[in-house]
Image (spheres, rainbow, N blue to C red):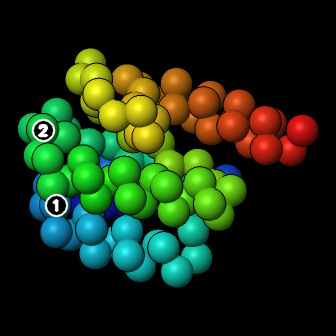
Amino acid sequence: MKLEKRDNFIFLYSVININELINKLELLKKNPENLIIKLDSKLINNDFLILSLVKYSSFWKTKHNSFILVVGDFSVQKKNLVCIPTLDEAIDYLYMEELERNV
């Protein structure tokens, strides 16, 4: 798994292991920042992961930060998760959420 600190968000990608992702989210939870996670469609089909991500997404929202998943062409049927097909669209979505929070 790789982590990049960008201008106003953290980008997690090349996620291979679910437990490693959960551990990293626990660490990031201590000081939550806007977060974009790129997941492979094979990983997103895991019910345990989806339930965990819903929990983390809710936490990030309470801290007034974005929690966005980039999942390609796969659509997650959870209303509590923001799933975007590309990184560019996820970044645009993040900026829109920031604008809404500042209004």
Q: Position of residue 51 (x, y in %)?
A: 26, 52
Q: Which residue: 33% across, 53% down?
A: 53
Relative to residue 68, is residue 23 drawn left or right? left
> Where does label 1 land, which residue?
18
The answer to whether 4 is drawn above or below residue 13 in the figure is below
In terms of depth relative to the viewer, which is nearer, 30 or 11?
Answer: 30
Q: Position of residue 56 (x, y in %)?
A: 42, 60
Relative to residue 22, is residue 62 drawn left or right? right
Q: CA distance from mark 1 to mark 2?
A: 11 Å
Q: Which residue: 29% across, 28% down?
A: 77
Q: Position of residue 26 (x, y in %)?
A: 38, 76
Q: Which image quadrant: the C terminus?
A: top right
Q: Residues within 10 Å of mark 1 (few under 14, many from 20)?
A: some
Q: Which image quadrant: the N terminus?
A: bottom left
Mark closest to the chain's N terminus, 1 or 2 = 1
> Where does label 2 land, which residue?
45
Q: Which residue: 52% across, 80% down?
A: 30
Which three-letter amino acid code belongs to the residue tagged 1? Ile
Residue 6 visible here = no
Count the marks: how many? 2
